DNA sequence: TATTGTTATACTCTATAACTATA
DNA sequence: TATAGTTATAGAGTATAACAATA
């Protein structure tokens, strides 16, 4: 079965995913929130409430940077700080309804442009992308420490089972 | 053929590609060059020498920002400024050998980590990703204004046929 | 007069170091 | 004494506005 083994060329994959990163950066508008802010917001939506330290590690920034980032998100009411009753040193950050709405709004705008780009591809190309989406999601889940089998983002879960606290 | 039509859900695609963007941002190390700098360098490698104004549009930043960005790349000898004999107002930026090497080095590091992530996926998932790569490349090519049918990036073409200048 | 690029200035985002509060 | 988070300070990166050189 050698001839048909579609082994992934990691170097080409790296270059291709890098171009996707650039494309998504250009598709993201307006530029009023930094990329890390948006990514953090998406993490809070995907993972539920998380501690400052944990978010800093997840996003690859320092703890002070995350403190200020959360402050900015809080100022715009996209996220909020909650105390941890179990350990009063800890601050837990959570996405707000407004934050969820903002993410949805931006993804809708991106989706609209992606639809235009997809329209320029062949049906076979669209099918290949659609077929690869779940695999790509699992790939990123491994990298981002997500919980892939759970529903991507229920509209408004009354409350993520309290605070999982430890990842 | 309706039952088997794998139509792309653009919203899910936007969310999934957004996670890819975050993943690639985290895979990119060290953080000594900004994302826009690296993206510009990759554009110069992919498209050949380009004018400041054109690069600014491509990367979605202002002209002054691109002026400074190229100055930083020049200071580290990753790119260089060349005059345009035809119009002396114009400055053309080009990637250097050192710049190409730096991009290659970073992609190799990313590829290594991607290989580890890919190893955690099923063979079917890897096959789906491999099968979708060309389609994803065409998708980004449409978005980034590239020239998709040409070879991705020949190791060291003696010289891109002079200055294509006008895109 | 229009276009290309640079310089001047201000603001955002991030890092390192020092600090406060709690464990 | 160690840990979680914040505050202080400095630097990179970007935008807008004003400028210089060439067309």
Image: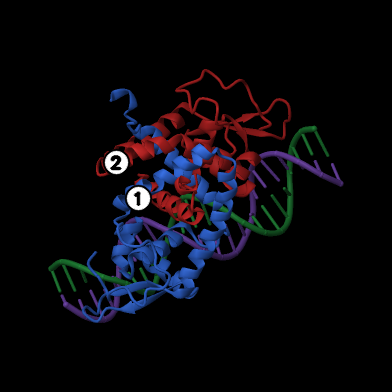
Chain colours: A blue, B red, C purple, D green
Determine the secondary structure under disc 1: helix
Identify which residue is drawn at 54% across, 33% down. Answer: B44
Chain to which mark 1 belongs: A
Q: Where does the image place residue A65, in percent across and percent down from the top left?
A: 38, 63
Q: A51 and A6: which one is in front?
A: A6
Q: Is residue B18 shown left or right of residue B166?
A: left
Q: Quadrant of the C terminus of chain A?
A: bottom left
Label 1 Cα neighbours within 10 Å, binned few <14 / some 14-19 / many ≥20? many
- Image x and y of residue C1, in percent: 86, 46
For the point 42% across and 66% down, the residue is A69
- Image quadrant for the N terminus of chain A? top left
- The secondary structure type at the circle numbered 2 is helix
Looking at the image, which residue sits at the far top? Answer: B158
- According to the picture, the residue beneath numbered tag 2 turns out to be B118
Compared with residue A138, is residue B101 higher up or lower down, i.e. above or below?
above
Residue appearing at x 33%, y 63% in the figure: A55
Please report the residue visible at 43 percent of the width from the left and 36 percent of the height from the top.
B133
Q: Foreground: A93 or A63?
A: A93
Residue B18 shows up from this direction? yes
Question: Distance between the Cα atoms at labels 1 and 2?
Answer: 10 Å
Identify whether C3 is placed above or below A146. Answer: above
């Amino acid at each position: 079965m050698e001839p048909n083994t579609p082994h992934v060329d990691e170097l080409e994959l790296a270059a291709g995913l890098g171009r996707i990163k650039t494309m998504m950066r250009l598709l993201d508008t307006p530029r009023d929130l930094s990329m890390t802010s948006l990514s953090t917001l998406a993490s809070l939506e995907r993972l539920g409430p998380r501690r400052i330290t944990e978010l800093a590690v997840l996003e690859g920034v320092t703890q002070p940077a995350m403190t200020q980032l959360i402050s900015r998100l809080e100022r715009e009411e996209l996220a909020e700080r909650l105390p941890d009753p179990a350990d009063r040193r800890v601050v837990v950050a959570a996405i707000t309804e407004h934050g969820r709405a903002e993410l949805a709004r931006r993804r809708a705008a991106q989706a609209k442009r992606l639809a235009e780009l997809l329209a320029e591809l062949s049906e076979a190309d669209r099918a290949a992308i659609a077929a690869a989406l779940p695999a790509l999601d699992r790939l990123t889940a491994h990298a981002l420490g997500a919980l892939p089998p759970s529903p991507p983002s229920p509209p408004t879960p009354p409350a993520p089972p309290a605070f999982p606290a430890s990842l």
